[in-house]
Amino acid sequence: MCGIVGYIGKRDAAPILLEGLHRLEYRGYDSAGIAVIEHTGQLRLAKCKGRVRELEKLLPRRFKGAPGIAHTRWATHGEPSDRNAHPHCDGANRVAVIHNGIIENAAALRTRLEAAGVAFCSDTDTEVLAHLIAAMPDGSLEAAVRAALRMVTGTYGLAVLDAARPDAIVVARNGSPVVLGIGEREMFVASDPAALVRHTRNVVYLDDGELAVVRADGFATSTLDGGATAKVPATITWANEAYDKGDFAHFMKKEIVEQPEAVRRTLSGRLEPRFQTAHLGGIELAAHELLDIHRVKILGCGSAYIAGCIGAHVIEQLARLPAHAEPASEFRYRNPVIERDTLYIAVSQSGETFDTLAAVQEIKRKGGRTLGVVNVVGSTIARECGRGIYLHAGPEVAVVSTKTFTCTVVALALFAIHLGRIRDLSPGQGGRLLAALAALPDQIDEILAREPEIARLAQDLACCDHAFFVGRSAGHAIAMEGALKLKEVSYLHAEAYSAAELKHGPLALITSQTPTVVVLPADDLLQKNLSTIEEIRARHGPIISITQANRAPPAVDAAFSVPVSAPELDPVLLNIPLQLLAYHVALQRGCDIDHPRNLAKSVTVE
Ligand code: AGP
């Protein structure tokens, strides 16, 4: 969600902070701001609604000195505006706070502070923190932050500056990520390593309930109660280019094109031809423990949930276990029954999605067994699950998930093969699937090479206001992902439906102005899907079909065929043209693809 950057050291903070904000601006935000303690000891502040480049224009030349903190905001309390942008200060402009998360008791605290004569300048929950910290009796900034945090309930990743105590930045974490970057007699603070990789690869991730005092020559971490904690620095291994767009016009396009390589990395070292199975070192469940699992439940949000739907389908097919996916955002509110013999799989690219994390915590509290399928190494969900499968897809910068969706499906397919081979999946079937997995990267390349065909298909959609996406079984999940992608980047109203359900209501909306994208694998349900196509054609609805190369294209208005994989893995290939379709529709509609409105990359609030 919001982005946090901080710097303390000998250099001027402002250029470093602005560069960090630029690195975070793809995550989605609506305003930005910066606070620096100048050489004179004065706290200088600039903030505004809009892009980081708008903020840059506001910065006076004399914005010199360090430490400094900066923020990109994704509005929760209060509309996006100059006054609601972070940092927020106390009345004397001494303490500045940037915050990611939600202070749940902000209204009550605000009433108390106002009764005591404090005047508020914004509608945000964050501003209460600045006033509370400033009002604490003299002592260290650390003590003041600690005392203020004891008064709040809610989630936060935050950084605090105090002009009266300019030798430190104090940061704290509860539910929103905070990472420290260790430099040469300088330190960095961020909500995402992307903001600091240009300066250091040596990082320390704070845990929930931890606070850190960051000085130019080092840092000290402790719990909120004041007990010292020991941290082991980690090393960021991805090259800087992984965080850059390079020659691509958009991160979304770059990440779509990176998919063959990303899938190779997800598969690397995990195909075990000797036993015709998959080898997954991180799942830490022995064969006899996996035999005790009688059900699989997959939880995730958005695209992660949809990838989970496909994963559940593959697990059910290969391991013959009941498997089901559910949006993590709904899960814990229905007081779910947690079963001893169920494996709960949490799927998340970022590993920080609040709803998914809360579902994992609820499962663990009730004694359930969890496994994470996560891209970001060391992220909260990965650590909370304790065991799992990393995607190794590389950093995904674009707000919309593309390569991590594909790699999640591949990772879940690996797990399905592993689980299946412990049960009734034959060596021959295992071998067939390993060969199909190994062929995926080249097959994805084949599809990507035909991008101009998809750009032409996009013309049919770009001028419409509404579209349907339909499919059956795993094809329905692909329809859901295709529609979600289109909505996110092109703002075209796209509705995904099970092809079988179409005639139970939504068919009423089919007209010559409402195209339908039909996901049409050459599987057992082909005839059924062809019947759906006929029903749509009879109502003059235009049809684009995404089908497979081993069958003649059906009589539709436009078609694109993908190479044939194993039936269980076909969804991976059927989805790639839909990613490109969404990209090209958005391009043709002139949308700001890497900054989709209202969206954030990692949703760390409820
Ligand atoms: C996908 O394009 C999205 N932007 C969104 O649905 C995303 O998949 C969801 O927020 C979950 O994120 P996560 O994978 O980081 O948990």
Image (cartoon, grey):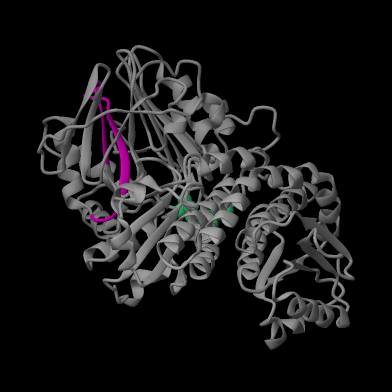
Residue 366 position within the rendered picture, expressed as x and y whole percent measured from the top left: 23, 68
Quarter of the image containing the C terminus?
bottom left
Q: Residue at x 29, y 50 (%)?
A: 386
User: Is residue 209 visible in this depiction of the protein?
Assistant: yes
User: Residue 13's quadrant in the figure?
Assistant: top left
User: Is residue 78 visible in this depiction of the protein?
Assistant: no
Front residue of this view, candidates 503 and 390: 390
Front residue of this view, candidates 530 and 566: 566
Residue 510 position within the rendered picture, expressed as x and y whole percent measured from the top left: 79, 78
Q: Residue at x 25, y 58 (%)?
A: 111
Residue 501 position within the rendered picture, expressed as x and y whole percent measured from the top left: 66, 82
Q: Is residue 591 left or right of residue 205?
A: right
* 470 is higher (above) or lower (below) than 79: below
User: Residue 555's quadrant in the figure?
Assistant: bottom right
171 inside magenta stretch = yes
Q: Is residue 177 left or right of residue 262?
A: left
Q: Which residues are magenta?
A: 153-172
Residue 266 position within the rendered picture, expressed as x and y whole percent measured from the top left: 51, 43
Front residue of this view, candidates 111 and 286: 286
